[in-house]
Image (tube, rainbow, N blue to C red):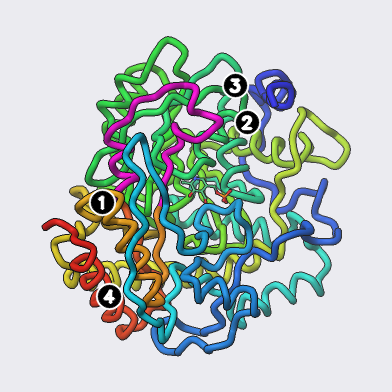
Amino acid sequence: MQGLRKDMNPAAGPASAPTTAPTTAPTTEPASAYATAAGEPGDSGASTDARPTPATAEAPATAEPPAVREALAAGAAVAGSPGSDTHVAAAAPSGAVGGLPAPPTASVAPVVATSTIPAAKPVIGDEEVAAAVRVLRDGRVVQGPEVAAFEQEFAALVEGRPCVAVNSGTSALHLALLALGIGPGDEVVVPSFSFAATANAVRLAGAEPVFAEVDPDTFCLDPDAAAEAVGPRTAALMPVHLYGHPAPMGRLTQLAQRHGLALIEDACQAHAAQLHGRPVGTFGDAACFSFYPTKNMHTLEGGLVVVPDEERARTLRLLRNQGMEQRYENEIVGANMRMTDVAAAIGRVQLERLAEWTQQRRRNARTLDLGLDAGLVAPRVADGARHVYHQYTVRVRGGAAVRDAVQARLRAEGIGCAVYYPTPIHRLRPYAHLGAELPVTDRAAAEVLSLPVHPSLTPGDLDQIVAAANRAVAEAGGTR
Ligand SMILES: Cc1ncc(COP(=O)(O)O)c(C=O)c1O
């Protein structure tokens, strides 16, 4: 990986400081906007919700293929790949965390689920299907006109900043780091309480993550802890807008400026979140979004980098496409991280409904806030933050054993719920040797539980979730 990154580093090639960057983005990239067979072999991603509108229609009972129906019945999120962030394994307790004792096997009363409310419900409705078919019939299926249009339309969410679409959120983070010249010898301060992709991208770029604590209320990077983590090799800060709550970008921007650090927003979970009226994605030197199926909007798989200027956008476009802007005129070493037009066309459909879905998520969260008992600590929202509830994540008072019992009980009642993240990144195998000590993070990992909040929930679903969660915490002996 080090070798890969070194080659790909734009600082090593003529594109590191492009002086002749075009001022407008090309609408297509001739190097790749030709027809190819679309898609990678392997998982089909996610099962889908065929309901046309979350507010009005009921889910068809048998919309999912059999394997997925089974997963849903087990309370699993609707993901096909175990490599995905919000894939949820079957209802096993999540195990010991951070040196805390392993939870006892939860004693679950024999409740038979009469219906299932999944943890997430990616929408692939008629419009998404029609958009995909339109592209397939058109034949321009890789990084063609749909991708260019998607980038332009997404820019409306980030005050018109240049957007560069790629094939995943991880690729977005990886390329953002490369485009900022971050690589071997550099350190990047990241929260450990996130999906592994946050730190993996740093490693893939050849740099080293340095883990810092999160705020115990919002679960986002704590600026004081980040300041302590800054050292002579620190090149960047990479806060995560976790669960859809914006990180404290004001203080983090000051910290970055004080030390001359790059600031990269991991906005993979936070489409349309805001802080003091300013959209996430507009604070950093780069910001990265994911369009994985369970995200607030999706493209099946996909990602996107937002940057403040066209020069950096050009570097990113080169990096995602073998260093080419014109076909066979490779300027630097790059990868193939292109988005397909099928993905982009689906993303354009989703983008049109993002505002409505976000409102619905926020309304659902409010209902849950009001209904949950004190044994479950509802998500806190910082002053000025617009939380978009990618996840509705409570703390279960009483620790991991109680949390796991609540989770098991909910799943037995057919309510999909999940722990993001049961093992903080600093305790995962690739990073454990760094020896980070993060008690606030460990505690969060032992106590969090995400309840369904997606826009397909009906009022009846919400009532069921509230009642079951309150019952589960009372039975599990959660403290008040
Ligand atoms: C915080 C965070 N960062 C990065 C990623 C990576 O995105 P993707 O799965 O699209 O590669 C995810 C996605 O799940 C995420 O939740």
Give the magenta-colored segment's residue range. Answer: 420-447
Residue denoted by label 3: 183
Q: Viewer-nearest of labels 2 and 4? A: 4
- Of labels 1 and 3, earlier in sequence is 3
Single out the residue that lies furthest toward the right. 328
At label 1, which amino acid type do we have? Ala
| Residue 289 in sight | yes
Amino acid at the residue labelled 2: Leu
- Which quadrant does the C terminus fall into? bottom left
| Residue type of the residue flagged with mark 3 | Gly
Q: Amino acid at mark 4?
A: Ala
- Is 188 situated left or right of 143 in this image? left
- Residue wearing tag 4: 468
Q: Residue at x 54, y 68 (%)?
A: 78
Disc 2 target residue? 204
The earlier-in-sequence mark between 2 and 1 is 2
N-terminal-most mark, 2 or 4: 2
Q: Position of residue 208 (x, y in %)?
A: 53, 22
Q: Earlier in the sequence, mark 1 or mark 4?
A: 1
Q: Are marks 1 and 3 in contact (CB under 8 Å)?
A: no
* Label 1 neighbour load within 10 Å: few <14, some 14-19, many 20+: some
Name the image quarter holding residue 131: bottom right
**How far is the residue under mark 2 from the one under mark 4?**
42 Å
Labels 2 and 1 touching (C-beta < 8 A) = no
Q: Which residue is mark 1?
A: 385
Quarter-wise, where is residue 373 in the image? Answer: bottom left
- Disc 3 element: loop
